[in-house]
Each structure stands twice: as C-alpha cells, then as structure tokens.
Amino acid sequence: MSRIACGVALLAGVLLSAPMASTPYTFHTYASMVAELQQLALDHPALAEYFTAQDAYGLPAVPDGAQQLVHPILRITNEALGLDKAEILLVGSQHGDEVVGMEVGVATARLLLESYGTDPWLTELVDRREIYILPLANPHGFNHGVRWSPGTESGSEDMNRDHLYDRDPCSFFCQDENSLSTVGARAIHELARRHLFRVMLDYHGGTELIIHPWGTPMHDADDESPDDRAHALLGQRMSSYGGPFRGVYPVGRSNSLLGSVFAPLDDTAYAASWDAGNADPLWPTAGWRSLAYTVEISNQKTPPQSTLGGDATILTPGGAEDGYVAKNVRIALATIDLIEPYVVWTNRAALPAQVGVGETVTVEWEVRGCFEVDDTHVRFGGDPDPRINFTGQSTTQQQSSGDPCFDGPTQFSAQVTLPSAGTWYLTPVAQVDSTLLTQVSPVPGATPPQSWVARARTQEGVLGINMTDPNEVNTVRGQLYWGAEPLAIQVGASEIFSDGFESGDLSVWSVVVQ
Ligand SMILES: [Zn+2]
C-alpha cells in the first residue's frame, strides 16, 4: 500500500514535487498498527528497523485474554550513514483512550519513508536523524478504550505518573508508589538508557495544548526550567507549523497551563539525568536531557475519524484536508528538523570544479535546524576540513527578518575569491542560537541550560556518550560553528585555451574533485 503518490520530475538537477494524491487518515486497530509498521520496515529495509520492546529489551508481553500484547518500535534513519546521529523519541498513547497519538506516530513514519528520495527536506531528515517511534505505549488500555495500564502495582495504573522524576510529593496525590511498574514506562526507559534523545514528544488527548517543563508539584506554576527559552521557542515553532486547524495550540509550562502531576514523562525526559537527586535512585537515569513536550492533540480523546485529515497538503499548515493527524505530523517534522543545526548548499551542483586564479565563486546556502542565525559565512583553505582549518573567509551574511532557519529559510550568498593556484576546500558555516543561553529566573537557581539541544550549539566538544548498547555508540558533539560537506575547487592559472578550458598547472587536472 502506498499512501502517497507524488509525481516527481528531475529538472536541471532540482527535484520538483507534483501535488500529492490525497488519502484520508483512518483509525488503526492494535493488529493493523503492528502490521503496518512491520510492512513499512519490509518495504524500506535501508531506512527502517522494526523491533519490539519485548524482543529487544526482554520485557514481558502484556496479557489481554488470549493475546500477548507487545510494544512495537520503529527506528527511521538512513542506515548507510551510520547510527551515531542526533536522536529523537516520539511516544503515543500512554493513556490508552487518547488514540490519535498512535495515529500520528504511524503517519509520521509512513510519510518520512515514502517521501525519501522525492522530497528534499524529508530526505535530509531521514539522512541526518535517528527517529525512534513508539506509537502505542499502552496497548492494553488502547484495546479496552481506557486510560489505565496494567502494572505490577495494580491492574489500572496511570502510565504518565510512572516515570522516574519527582517521586517525593507522592504523599499528597499518589496512586503509584513505584517507578516503572508498567511495561510501557519500562519500554520508554530502556530506549532512554541506550540513546541520547535531543527531544521527546509525548502525544496525548483530551485538551489542545503544547506543554513543557516544569510540570511536577515540586515546582511552582510559574517556575522556569533552566531551558525555558529553548522549550518556549521550540514549542512556538511546533504550534506555528502545526497551524490553525481547530485553533493554534497554546504553548506554555505544564504547571501553568494544565496543572502539576508527579512523575510524568516530560519532566523525567528533561531532568532525570542532571537532577538525579529528585529522581528514583533505583533506576539508571543517564541520557535524559531532552527538551520534552506533552502535546494534547484534541479536546475529544477519540475524535471523529473525519477530523484526522489527510495527506494531500501535509506540509502546508491550514492546507486542504488538514486535521489532527496532519497537524501533528507537521509538529513532529518541525521538531525532528530542529534537534541539531545543519547547513545545506543550494548551488553546489552549479559550482565549477575549476576556476582561474583570482576568479570569484558565488556560494549559496541555507542554515537549518535552528531558530536564529548568529553568524554565517564561507570558510576556505587547503585543508579538507575548512570548517575547522581555514585560511580565508567571506564576509558575514545577515539573516533576513522572520524565521531564517525553517519553512522557507533565508537563502544566504557570498562571493569567495580563491587567491592562488592549488586545491581549495570551501564550506559555508554558521553559528546559531546563542539566544538559548538567555535565562530570566531558572529553577533550580543558577543552573545553566542543561538540554542537549541548547548545549550542543553553545559548547564545543563531546558533551555526552552512551555505550549501553554494544552495537551502537551514541554521542552528542557540541559545535559553535556548523558546516556543510566541503567542496573542492581546483584553482589554476587563468590563461584560456581556445576550447574554453583553462591551462595552468596541467599536473593537477587529474585530481579535480567534482
Ligand atoms: Zn493523557
């Protein structure tokens, strides 16, 4: 089954996407969700890996009558480019009756996989990211149309009160003495132990909001997290790109907009690692430094199927066939984009492989995965990694007003004159988002930003490394300047042969790099 039938033409090296045929989103059953994820992995073996928390982590299945329910997980990434990339986790339906979250997970997976190689932006995301999707954290509650999940403490636990952070205030509102007593919470924890998720999105329903830490009773309603600036900016990006369907989502701190709950996933994903003193000491907490959001999708936990929308204009906020699934797939994409900065050439294919000494080359590029461009220019030199080792640079380019990094990003351009004969390497570079260091009154006080997202673009060096899974080392590397793949240009003497080729040092012509 191919949901998307995009016509694509290759014209002058540019991918042109024709309008997509529309397919309305429909509700899945547990079985059809499992089958669809398995089929997506079979259809896209180089991009998708299907596994279950039971097979991968040895967790128990959840009995439901004669059935043994499992927790399917899909990993989406271009595996040929390795498995040490910026990682993100999408979680759906911890509350079993809040069903649209599962649909968002499945639809996001399908869109990314079926757009690979045709949509340039979505292809970049699959190449550059490792996207983990657990669409149905609570299969038993889902099958019975209830919020609750069976757990080791009782037959009806609230999974979103079963995580590691903030166990202390349990005395004033506590149905759940122990952490991770539901299999779904364990599955999320096992994922978090092995990875370094830059962002975690947790889809719910029952109201329409995007909320972020703080969200536990140990913090007051207006307490700012040390990453409040990053949380707010990404929340606004999500809300804006989600768009106007049934109203643009308000964005704010959980404690202020919805009220506090103890041991929720979002505060756990954000703080359990660096504020381990307030997390359950019985479980390892390393890794969690995610910007973390609860997305409350729809006022009705199970809205009419006609409100899910379709994929006809999935990348257009407020477009035709918009709906709750389309809106939240866009929110997932905006978030996947933001988790790490990247710089993209936009005229690389048009640049000459050779120029004469003193000739000028025009470099054009975009800076993505960011909120603001603080500085961007072209670096060049004789070293193959001119982002680090450069002997010259262009003038700094100014960002235009508005949103320079996303959904129609600013096109930067600079003139570069390569000064002497030889092989020169060029790359556009960018410094971004120093704004994320802005704080007003963080709680805990005097705590600088802790998230991978803020730190990786404001600090140099290896900030985190996770080798829990012997098959996959994950690293967070901070950079003040982000670059694109360097381009080699041969600079020769500028005397012109009659056939139009340049002469100069003929001996170097054989090492021209295209
Ligand atoms: Zn919920």
Image (cartoon, rainbow, N blue to C red):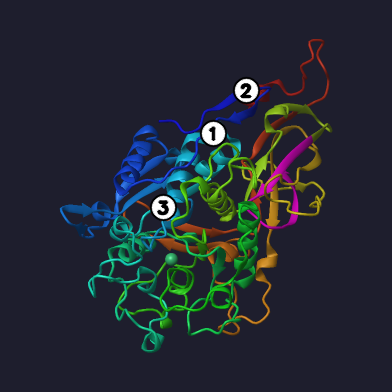
Residue 388 visible to an observer of this rendering = no
| For residue 322, side relative to residue 158 (left or right) | right
Residue 477 visible to an observer of this rendering = yes
Please give the residue where the numbered disc 3 appears in the rendered image: 102
For residue 22, the mark is: 1
For label 1, the crowd category at 10 Å Cα-Cα, with few meaning under 14, some 14 to 19 and many 20 or more, is some
Dot 1 falls on a residue whose secondary structure is loop
**Amino acid type of the residue tagged 1 in the rendering:** Ser
Magenta stretch, residue numbers: 362-380
Q: CA distance from mark 2 to mark 1?
A: 22 Å
**Amino acid type of the residue tagged 3 in the rendering:** Met
Which of marks 1 and 2 precedes in the sequence? 2
Q: CA distance from mark 2 to mark 3?
A: 35 Å
**Amino acid type of the residue tagged 2 in the rendering:** Leu
Q: Quadrant of the N terminus?
A: top left
Pick the front one: 476 or 59: 59
> Quarter of the picture for ligand 1?
bottom left
Q: Residue at x 62, y 58 (%)?
A: 239
